[in-house]
Image (spheres, rainbow, N blue to C red):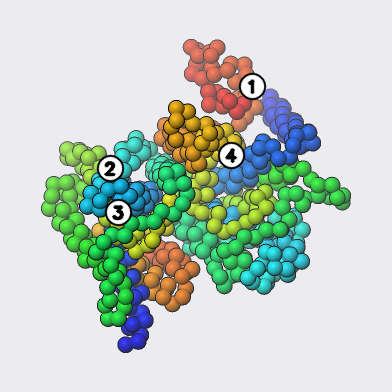
């Protein structure tokens, strides 16, 4: 009985926290300048959080070491851009300069977003058939290879009438074109990212906590034991792969909305590596970890470490700080995390109110250090 | 005759690229044979060798620059192993792979920093860059030198592994890590030796490879790296002759596909080959059968 009450209380806490967060976001968007770097970080952070969680579903919960995320984001981004582009733009020659656009269909934002996910999922289902029979590192190489194949394919000249070849796609419906339903008032863009990505992450969390999710975890922990318990290995792996790719596709579409232009050249292997590193920093097998890590990652990358790139910040006449130094420092920090804190921020645990309360009663285990070893040390800053 | 004249340049280029791939693939296959690790950073070590050459040849004569490039690349490979892989010796395989990806990310970002993101023009090596004509096909001399040099190096390496003490130790470690250690083999030095040989060959490969291409960019190691890994898998991971044959097959096939005007699909072919070989014969052409214990 007590446990049930606890659960109810926790659910209420979560709801209140989400509501507070949304209200804060709305207030911020109404009062602050929309060009503020904070909004860029929040938007991009949320988009990366979605793709990181989708990768975590594969790598952390199903134990499939897949490196194809950038490829599925690419499919999502292109599908969204192509289908949401107004027909007039397609027929004109501002975007499709060298080709005649083959797809004249124009969709609204939500159908296009959904289609972006579905396209990525369909491709994933096709690829999954051969690839998911491979084990660990071979799977990683094969998925990485397919991501590269997508990139080559989308830039292929013969695909020009659809993908505009290697040229940029733009003038589709970006974040500024989102309107509040039935009105003409623009929807706050950051709030839109949070709502779409938040709902997607919530669906993934529900999936992880369902019986399918338990089957995924069983496969991760021991394939043979899972099979012996009657879990259809291939079916569940394919399912996890398809669902993960679906959400990667949606996050690709959101990324396209966020940055106003899309080009296949952007979705390189390095992008998958970045997403994987976010997952590792957050803790493989922790959804909250992935979210926290993606905001930290984006904030460091776009904001906090920016000063390292400014050559005007050099002292003592040394010319160390210049464009690119930020990324060097950043990758060294990442290597330190990978080598010495391989559990990441959250390890395999999730954020829980019980642990948060315990933390506030006894921060860093200072009070009870002698009685029992600290339980809540690693939740520290995020609680 | 006209068919020969049309297709000969592609076949020649294929053999040459195949030889360069072979030199890189050996690094992959040896490391995987011993550590069961895809050394994602190996392609970037290869790129770094190209960068070293660009920067060193700007201030030094070639006679001094080339040995220094080889030395620096070897040092880089050795340091990577010591700093990023050795501390994780008892960690799960996935952690080591992630560490390898981290190293790759680090090397690429360092290269980006030092080049400012611009493609660097690779120096012309005298003699190697000269054009020659065989059977009416015009090509650089490096095209002819590569396969010969590759075969010489591979034969040398095979003899080294077969007859020297370090070579025997390498084979022992790749067979059984724990037992080798119990027999008194210094596993860590053997692993270092593997990385040193792999990096040295990658450096030679990069000298030959970039002579054919005009420039080096921070990402130019990525794709050749992946292709060479596929070559290593195709030939049977852990087997040196296998990696060489796989690399030649991939190099030649890739250039024939390019010759047919399907450049976009040369990458597709490589990965299709990987998937087919893994589904049909997971141990590769010359790989030893491994049994998985439950």
Q: Which chain contains the residue that carries disc 2?
A: B
Q: Quadrant of the N terminus of chain B?
A: bottom left
Q: Of marks 2 and 3, which one's residue comes earlier in the chain?
A: 2
Q: Residue furthest bottom?
A: B1
Residue A22, placed above or below residue A371: below
Query: What's the CA distance linking mark 1 and mark 2?
Result: 51 Å
At 25% across and 53% down in the image, what residue appears? Answer: B62
Label 2 near label 1: C-beta < 8 Å?
no
Label 2: few (<14), some or many (≥20) within 10 Å?
A: some
> Can you give x and y, in whole percent of width and height, for residue B25 in the image?
31, 57
Q: Which residue is mark 2?
A: B75
Q: Which chain contains the residue that carries disc 4?
A: A
Nearer the observer: mark 1 or 2; the answer is 2
For label 3, the SS is helix
* Same chain, labels 1 and 3: no
Residue B202: mark in rendering: 3
* Same chain, labels 2 and 3: yes
Label count reads 4
Query: What's the CA distance linking mark 4 and mark 1?
Result: 32 Å
Residue A357: mark in rendering: 1
At 32% across and 53% down in the image, what residue appears? Answer: B28
Q: Which residue is mark 4?
A: A302
Where residue B242 sits, quadrant-wise, is: bottom left
Query: What's the CA distance linking mark 2 and mark 3?
Result: 12 Å
* Same chain, labels 4 and 1: yes
For label 1, the SS is helix
Label 3: few (<14), some or many (≥20) within 10 Å?
A: many
* Same chain, labels 4 and 2: no
> Can you give x and y, in whole percent of width and height, for residue A214 in the image?
57, 44
Q: Is A82 left, or right, of B13 in this rendering? A: right
């Amino acid at each position: 009985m007590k446990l049930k009450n606890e659960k109810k209380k926790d659910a209420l806490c979560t709801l209140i926290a989400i509501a507070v967060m949304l209200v804060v976001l709305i207030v911020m968007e109404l009062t602050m300048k929309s060009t503020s770097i904070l909004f860029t970080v929040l938007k991009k952070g949320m988009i990366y959080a979605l793709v990181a969680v989708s990768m975590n579903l594969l790598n952390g919960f199903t134990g499939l070491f897949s490196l194809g995320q950038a490829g599925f984001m690419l499919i999502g981004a292109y599908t969204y851009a192509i289908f949401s582009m107004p027909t007039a733009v397609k027929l004109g020659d501002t975007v499709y300069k060298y080709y005649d656009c083959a797809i004249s269909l124009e969709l609204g934002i939500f159908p296009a977003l959904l289609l972006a996910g579905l396209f990525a999922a369909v491709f994933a289902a096709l690829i999954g058939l051969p690839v998911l029979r491979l084990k660990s590192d071979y799977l990683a190489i094969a998925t990485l290879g397919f991501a590269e194949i997508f990139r080559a394919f989308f830039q292929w000249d013969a695909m020009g009438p659809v993908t505009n070849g290697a040229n940029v796609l733009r003038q589709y419906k970006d974040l500024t074109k989102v309107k509040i339903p039935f009105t003409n008032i623009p929807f706050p863009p950051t709030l839109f990212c949070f709502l779409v990505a938040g709902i997607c992450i919530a669906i993934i969390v529900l999936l992880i906590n369902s019986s399918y999710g338990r089957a995924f975890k069983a496969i991760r922990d021991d394939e043979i034991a899972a099979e012996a318990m009657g879990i259809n290995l291939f079916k569940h792996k394919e399912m996890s792969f398809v669902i993960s790719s679906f959400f990667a596709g949606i996050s690709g579409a959101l990324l396209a909305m966020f940055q106003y232009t899309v080009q296949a050249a952007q979705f390189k292997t390095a992008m998958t590596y970045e997403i994987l590193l976010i997952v590792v920093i957050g803790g493989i097998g922790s959804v909250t970890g992935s979210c926290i890590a993606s905001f930290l990652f984006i904030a460091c990358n776009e904001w906090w470490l920016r000063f390292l790139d400014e050559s005007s910040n050099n002292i003592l006449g040394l010319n160390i700080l210049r464009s690119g130094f930020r990324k060097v420092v950043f990758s060294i920090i990442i290597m330190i995390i990978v080598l010495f804190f391989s559990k990441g921020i959250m390890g395999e645990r999730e954020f829980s109110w019980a642990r948060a309360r315990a933390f506030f009663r006894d921060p860093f285990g200072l009070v009870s250090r002698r009685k029992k070893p600290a339980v809540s040390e690693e939740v520290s800053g995020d609680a | 005759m006209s068919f020969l004249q049309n297709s000969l340049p592609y076949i020649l280029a294929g053999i040459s690229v195949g030889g360069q791939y072979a030199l890189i693939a050996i690094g992959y296959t040896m490391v995987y044979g011993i550590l069961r690790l895809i050394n994602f950073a190996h392609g970037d070590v290869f790129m770094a060798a190209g960068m070293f050459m660009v920067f060193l040849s700007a201030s030094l004569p070639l006679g001094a620059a080339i040995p220094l490039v080889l030395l620096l690349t070897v040092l880089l490979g050795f340091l990577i192993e010591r700093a990023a892989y050795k501390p994780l010796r008892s960690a799960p395989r996935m952690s080591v792979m992630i560490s390898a990806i981290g190293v790759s990310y680090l090397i690429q970002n360092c290269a980006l920093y030092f080049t400012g993101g611009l493609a660097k023009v690779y120096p012309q090596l005298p003699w190697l860059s000269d054009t020659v004509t065989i059977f009416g096909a015009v090509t650089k001399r490096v095209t002819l030198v590569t396969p010969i040099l590759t075969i010489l190096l591979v034969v040398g390496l095979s003899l080294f592994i077969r007859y020297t003490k370090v070579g025997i130790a390498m084979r022992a470690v790749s067979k059984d890590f724990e037992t080798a250690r119990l027999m008194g083999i210094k596993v860590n030095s053997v692993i270092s030796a593997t990385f040193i040989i792999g990096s040295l060959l990658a450096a030679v490969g990069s000298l030959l490879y970039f002579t054919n291409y005009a420039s080096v960019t921070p990402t130019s190691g990525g794709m050749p790296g992946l292709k060479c890994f596929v070559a290593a898998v195709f030939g049977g991971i852990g087997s040196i002759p296998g990696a060489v044959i796989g690399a030649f097959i991939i190099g030649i096939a890739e250039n024939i596909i390019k010759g047919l005007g399907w450049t976009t699909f040369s990458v597709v072919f490589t990965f299709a080959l990987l998937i087919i070989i893994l589904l049909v014969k997971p141990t590769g052409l010359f790989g030893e059968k491994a049994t998985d214990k439950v």
